[in-house]
Image (cartoon, rainbow, N blue to C red):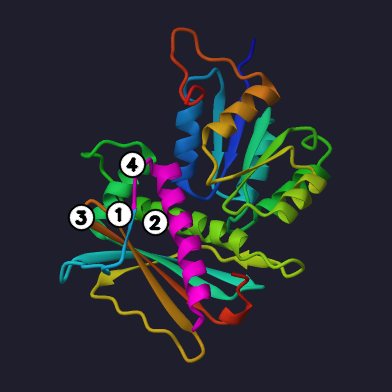
Amino acid sequence: MKAPRILLVDDSRATRAIVAKMLGGYECEILEAANGALGLEAARQGQPDLIVLDMTMPVMNGVETLQALQADEALRTIPVIMLTANSNPEEMEQMKALGATEYITKTQKPRLILERAIALIGLQAKPGTVAAGTSA
Amino acid sequence: MQNPTQEHGLKMFIDDAVITVFDTMLAMELYPSDHGAHFKPNAEQVIGMVGLAGGVTAVICLRVTETFAHCLTEAMMGLGPDASLTGSDINDVIGELTNITAGKLKSCFRIPGQPCSLSLPTIVRGRSIDMESMSGTERHSFTFHHGDEPVVVEFYSLNQKEIPI
């Protein structure tokens, strides 16, 4: 079975590195993009199974990217986890209304992303590895 | 922010935001300090700045030494102490830490019906940097320590009366 493909869209290389490292113990292919415009292009070319999308980015921010994903028939069914620096209930409702599947703030434990990815796309640990991030 | 209750409230929010961000992103403990920061003379500093605009108008600055910024970058990117880091890597990490801190503060300062936006982070580097507030702007400085390394968070607010503390 083909490993699921996860697209990380965040202008911070450090945040992409944290998420990619956490997903490293799982069967998946990671794609990365540094802003929404590049993320949209990567989504069209790579057809990911899950998108982790930052909110505040240059060129095209998370809201604009989410709207563009929803407007594209080939992409609108891909689950999107919005990753944001701030926890605002109104913004959370707005993102869900725009089509985001999940909304996670960066001050929550990063393993939440992993837990959501497991729930959304059935991410499986690589055989023979101790998958990080789910036991703490 | 002449009101001591507001000053105390701001300190509580900033303490919580900064300590939470360093714990979550870096698994690093920070302790608030009442004694101010002692940056070594001529030590290079890295300052991350993020603006808040909308219901609250403010700038949040996070200031560390270049040496500590290097340690933070290694920790956040999961690299060893001998890793080769570029200035861009360090800017990325300090910018992201400032951004997440500002995001957490933004949610603390939420005013219903008055949306507030964050700017993209800006980085300033240099030695003996003095930052001054303009007329009508209030400056608040909060110091934290990780071991001997100071972390200074400065909060410049324009319409402090509007901050819902």
**Image quarter (top left, top right, bottom left or bottom right) of the C terminus of chain B:** bottom right
What's the amino acid at mark 4? Ala
What's the amino acid at mark 2? Ile
Q: Which residue is mark 2?
A: B94
SS type, badge 2: helix
Q: Which chain does tag 3 point to?
A: B
Mark 1, Cα crowd under 10 Å, few <14 / some 14-19 / many 20+, is many
Judging depth in this view, the residue of B96 and A105 nearest the camera is A105
**Which residue does the image show at 52% across and 36% down from the upper left?**
A110
Q: Residue furthest bottom?
A: B135
Callouts 3 and 1 close, C-beta under 8 Å: no
In which image quadrant can residue B48 be found?
Answer: bottom left
Please tell me which of labels 3 and 2 falls first in the chain.
Answer: 2
Please tell me which of labels 4 and 1 falls first in the chain.
Answer: 1
Callouts 4 and 2 close, C-beta under 8 Å: no
Q: Which residue is mark 1?
A: B69
Rendered location of residue B24, percent (x, y): 45, 43
In which image quadrant can residue B45 be found?
Answer: bottom left
- Distance from the alpha carbon under mark 2 to that under mark 1: 7 Å
Rendered location of residue A50, percent (x, y): 67, 31
- Distance from the alpha carbon under mark 3 to that under mark 2: 19 Å
Please tell me which of labels 4 and 2 falls first in the chain.
Answer: 4
Callouts 3 and 2 close, C-beta under 8 Å: no
Left or right of A44 on screen, residue B96: left
* Foreground tag (3 vs 1): 3
**On residue B148, which mark appears?**
3
Magenta-colored span: B1-30
